[in-house]
Image (spheres, rainbow, N blue to C red):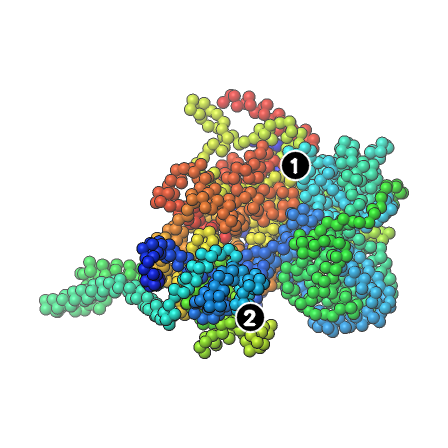
Amino acid sequence: MADTKKYWKGIDELNDTKAFQDSKDVEFPEQNNSLENFLADDSLNESSTGRRDFLKFLGFSVAAATVAACEAPVIKAVPYVMKPENVVPGMATWYASTYYDGSAFASILVKTREARPIFIKGNKDFGITSGSVTPPIIASVLGLYDSERLQEPMKSGKSSKWSTVDSEISNALKTSKRVVLVSNTVISPSVLSSIEILKSSASGSFDHIQYDPISYSGIRNAHALNYGKAMIPSYDFSKAKTIVSVNADFLSTWLMPTQFATQYGETRNPDSEWMSKHFQFEAVMSVTGSNADYRGMTKPSEEESVLRYILDKLIGKPASISKGLKANADAAVTSLKISGEESLVVCGTNNTGLQQLVNEINNAVGAYGTTIDLYNELNLFQSEEGKMLDLVDSMIKGSVPDVVLFYNSNPVYSLPNGKAFAKALKTVKTSVSLNSHGDETAVACTFMCPDHHALEAWSDFQPTTKHYALAQPMITQIHNTASALESFVVWAGVAERVGKTSTLAYEKIKETFSDINGGNFDLAVHNSCVDLVSSTIEETFSFSSASISKTPKFSKGVEFVAYQKTAIGAGNHANNPWLNELPDPISKVTWDNYITMNPVEMTKAGYATTYDQENGLSLATITANGIKLTLPVYPLPGQALGTVGVALGYGRGGHGEKIGKAAYQTKEYGGYITDKNGNPKSIGENIFPMIMSSANELTYANSAKVNKVDGEYIIAATQIHHTVMGRHSIVRETTKGIYDSNGKESYNPAHMLQTIDADGSHVEKPVSEFDLWDAHPVENIGHRWGMTIDLSSCIGCSNCLVACQSENNVPVVGKDEVRRGREMHWLRIDRYFASAEEAAVGTRKDKDTFSFSAAEIAALNPKVVHMPMMCQHCNHAPCETVCPVAATTHSNEGLNQMTYNRCIGTRYCANNCPYKVRRFNWFNYPAYKKFTEINPAQDDLGRMVLNPDVTVRTRGVMEKCSFCVQRIQSTKLEAKKEGVPVADGKFATACSDVCPTNAIVVGDWNDIESNVRKSSEEKRSYQALEEIGVKPNVWYKVKVRNEENDLLSKLQVDKKAHHEPSHKQH
Amino acid sequence: MKITNIQKVTKISFGLQALVLFFFLTLVPTYFSQGEGLFKAKCATCHAVFSNGTGPKLYEARKRWESVDEGELIYEWVRNNAALRASGKSNRANEIFQEYKGSVMTVFADLTDEQITSVFDWIDSQDPNAQAAGGGNQASAGGGDVMDEEQGLPWMWIIMGIMFSIIIMAVGGVRRQLKIATKESTEDAEGLTYVEEFKTWAWKYRLYVGLATLVIVLSLIVGFFQTLYQINLQESYQPSQPIAFPHDVHAGVNGIDCKYCHNSVTKSKSAGLPTVNVCMNCHKKINGEGKEFQGEINKIYAAAGWDPTKGPAGEYTGETNPIVWNKVHNLPDHVYFNHSQHVEVGGLDCKQCHGDMAKLKETAKVQPHQELNKIEENIESKIQFDRATLTMGWCIQCHDQSGISIGDGKNQYYTEIHDRLKKNDYDLLNSYNEDGRVSVKELGGWECSKCHY
């Protein structure tokens, strides 16, 4: 067996607790006391239906349903009056556009059906993001159909008319002495020019303050000191042979993850000329940290010493650092010295001093000019929090402007002193919010003038100096909203409001486009962007050292880090049910916010380190900035000792604001959990008030006190579900050194079985030569759809999961159901922690060799492997043989077909699936009241997002990954209509479509020239659970880490030497 | 058609008789059928044979051009009317354009002289007097259904007949036995209740009673399942429609190709209901002759927002009102059906599943499978249904019966599939070909995920 390391998914599994032992064999955990709970539910008593009535109703409805079923309903069909030229009913139309929400930027392609946007993916052909997206971008299509989006202008909380609102606002602007416009970073040249028009129309002073909830001002300030210009340069990770990241989660949330993930992926191929070496120093295990070759657990207060140590070592000065970080820091220095200018050092902490140190290091290694481009500035993140904090201070002190406008900005939520600001805001004579929801800031304003959704509006963006991008509307605005660009011009008195037919924004953008000499406008709209050739003479930058500014100071005790989750970010998408249900890539927790703490420390302090569907986590209070919040404590391996982490972006809209149906906690049988005022309770807590703000710089960390309190809190994580029962032939891993110098048999050996050959002697043969069944006639005949997943490139970003949910109408089930292990995601990403501690396959249960104390240390800072797992479409599928009604069958194209209308829900197939990838519809999710709040399919508007080519499943049927069979069928049909064979690359599943690192390759395996065929025949390819002989159509590729690992090399390289002689004895 | 050909032949002068006859019998018939096809595909949407529509009537159009000595120019006119007008060669061209202002004729640059001739030949061969009799063919169409229903009855009668005769025999037996009983001994029967009497009687004739019970139970079961199979059948479903749209006038008399109105049928999964602007392509000019038609056509105008009284030739008011049709062919949501797959790739004619709409006077209807079995194309392709239309049995019956020519090299997609089969599993290919064809089923047409996902 190939295994070398011990892999585990949770502390429970590692410690092999009783609860884990009990639960792991149970595919569908039953709730122990569900009947008691049900009977004790008070709401049942509220109903006045007696037993006899109930039986009468039952009898009647059965009869009625029977009779009704005999009569087909009359279905209406309404054709267009004037059919738009490019809409063909039943055919998808794709538009190129651009996504920008104030933090993430990407060139996207939007799929529309009958003029309804239903799917978003990256644009691989044009733009600066090379087809890369993030989960919030994919899920943003759902926001369009959010029924709680503001549908019309409001005045003092009551609906109003645009004419009224417009005249009152422009009057206020005309007579005011001081106007302030607060927005997030505006990178739209057209919006900026319309703001200029508004500014020139104002009678008094007019300030435009750009303020982002997540600020990167430290990078700008540091460059101002070192290069004389406040800027964020462009980074290119694809050229970096050594990457050192200090608390920068650049694969998921830091700056431009849509650019960096793809660039990083390019450097992680062990078969290419070189492979990057990645060092991460961070407190909370991030997606980026989980991919690092070396990861040092670093407290926020130690970041400075790490950077200084690296800098001093590089320039040959004596330096010292704490013992725990020395090994990693030394390795980083050595690697930086070797790769020289092909290195990149980044730091995610927003502090000028730290960023200056980063600049010094990058300058010392010569990264400027190779991996860092100063001449192509990033225009995102121009937050001027200093100006904002000053405004807030003066407003709290009583000096309020006459008019305050908010555009895409929610400072009441995201400011450290947001509550005080909200109070001051109420004293402003005219306050206007252009936000899409009645959010924290908007409800404190007199006027709400909702902007269009991004998919309804024309927009333009200039994300970098050399790039100009366009966004086009996919759909006429659903509600009575107005584009912000138009509103500004109307309020300036320069234009009239015309309503839905308005072309003002379009004209304005066209004008901007001709100003910047973009060329052919229609072509630019088609591609969604143009590259600009700057005609101005470029300034030259040269490095000048400056004294290091103040770095963040922490008092002794616990340090806390406010981090961003992949899905929720800074809270823009807190109302998106897909994102709330997306398991966090590391913790695998859904629908919740929690304190992360290292399990080693938790055990010492007496916190519960295990949990399951019935047993919750311990609660603790966290105190910082004089604010005290109570949250559950989650055991996160890899968390730096002496630190805790809490995610930003939670605790939104808990004071009666309407930020979206799915943003609140729901009860077990539907409805919201409410607070004492009757307002629905928000999910998690807002920790923006706890962050450090010193010298007008917001730093997302602070000193804190954490105290255990009584009580427990049940958390819904997918982590402990779908365990693989210790069969460790699932994940395979090796190091670059072993991979380069040894053969396949050391790191990826075939599974051998003993048999007796013709001579009667024992021989070993690979498992592929044994077969109980006749072969399915799929090889080399017709198509055989296959997939390979490269564990080396997979970074665990979770794009695939959200894209699958969007493409396949996967229902949202909510926290309570996820807790019971009933999540419906067709694709899950298994996150395995791997300890280097000695443990071969199957020895975990062996008490003699299993060392508990050694395992504890392993939990301190483990290595991580992300493994996307979905239906493997086995050619000898165990699920097919047990279905009593042949609802799951094999196709001659290698697909394991699931036929919903045949399924009677015995669930035998799920029991028999070795990969645990089948999902059962426990409820009628599109109708049952439990899911009304969270399932968009229960909403007339939300339903619009459903993919019409995929059946919406009903209660009592099984479902699972179909390999996007609807896409297979349409690809084949395209080819048939054109009369050509299916070309490789024409077929892509939703998951492979959105993979930023191209880790997922799909195609026709029978096409011997196809990428998937070649990929599956590489020496790194293996099949999960090969030994059980189910012959999947999915291959995985061994993860290669660019590290030195003596233990692993001993196991993998020396094993053969032990192995061979031992068998000669047979 | 043959009769008209022969009529034409008789007009040919005798001197060329032998030669011309030879040519006519071999070539002309193909000419004429080509002309009809071209007319229906390219012209019929705007032109009728005997009446003016969006464009002028085409009957004896050549004569009208010849009468102004521009007979040769008609070919240029057909191919590219705009170019002819621009050239200034033809007065007639401009006259027609003036007369039909607002409707620009489509350019048919790829038509050859022969093809244009064939169209006019076919048009001129039509009999102006036959038009009135045109409707006569369809008069009997309604009778078919009744016949079928009657045909469905006899076996029920047979079963019932058997049941009744068994009952009669049984009753007769009872009478006989009673008679015997009363004659032989009156004492025996005393003190017995009716139930006991019946039991005794039933036991005595247990063979008959047993058989009768068996027959009754069996027919009840059969009847029960027969009823179940009838539930929710779409066959013969004919919902009312907001506009009494006559398919026979459009597709039949005027010969408009189905794909002109249902124009996404070759591209998309949905054939597409005609959008109102497509109706208006013709109905701007054609506003109905009788009052009953006018009412229906006015409904289109209301939908399109067209006011025929405004301006010289009508104008759009801008107030549109979509037509809400009742969907006729409904499939359950868990079925994926793609029209373009069947029409474009499979080469099916609309008729094969929808029946001959050109003969359907009433509003659209799901044709019973018995009707479909009469369609010429189905008979030719040996497709015979015995399952109700739009049931799954009906679908897969056709998938079993129809073949795909994968080896003829016409579609490279299938050539690739054929090559893979040939190269890697020749035996399998042979087993497919045992019945002389590769059926849709053999290539996976019976697999669940081809239609259910």
Where is residue A824 shown, x and y percent of the image?
Answer: 56, 52
Where is residue A248 shown, x and y percent of the image?
Answer: 75, 44
Q: Residue visible at 78% across and 42% down? A: A372
Q: Amino acid at mark 1?
A: Asn
Check if mark 2 and mark 1 are on a common chain: no
Quarter of the picture containing the N terminus of chain B is: bottom left
Residue A717 makes an appearance in the image = no
Closer to us: B154 or A616: B154
Q: Residue visible at 74% across and 42% down? A: A236
Q: Residue visible at 71% across and 36% down? A: A276
Q: Dots 2 and 1: beta carbons under 8 Å?
A: no
- The answer to whether A285 is drawn above or below residue A805 in the figure is above
Closer to us: A189 or A478: A189
Q: Determine the image quadrant of residue A470.
A: bottom right
Q: Which mark is residue B98?
A: 2
For the residue labelled by badge 2, is the local secondary structure a helix, a strand or a loop?
helix
Closer to us: A851 or A3: A3
Q: Amino acid at mark 2?
A: Gln
| Identity of the residue furthest to the left in this view | B184
- Circle 2 packing at 10 Å, graded few (<14), some (14-19), many (20+), is few
What residue did someone put label 1 on?
A269
Q: Residue visible at 85% across and 31% down? A: A316
Where is residue A733 shown, x and y percent of the image?
Answer: 62, 35
- Circle 1 packing at 10 Å, graded few (<14), some (14-19), many (20+), is many
| Chain hosting mark 1 | A
- The answer to whether A685 is drawn above or below residue A20 in the figure is below
Where is residue B283 shown, x and y percent of the image?
Answer: 51, 70
For the residue labelled by badge 1, is the local secondary structure a helix, a strand or a loop?
loop
Q: Determine the image quadrant of residue A183.
A: bottom right
Closer to us: B330 or A688: B330
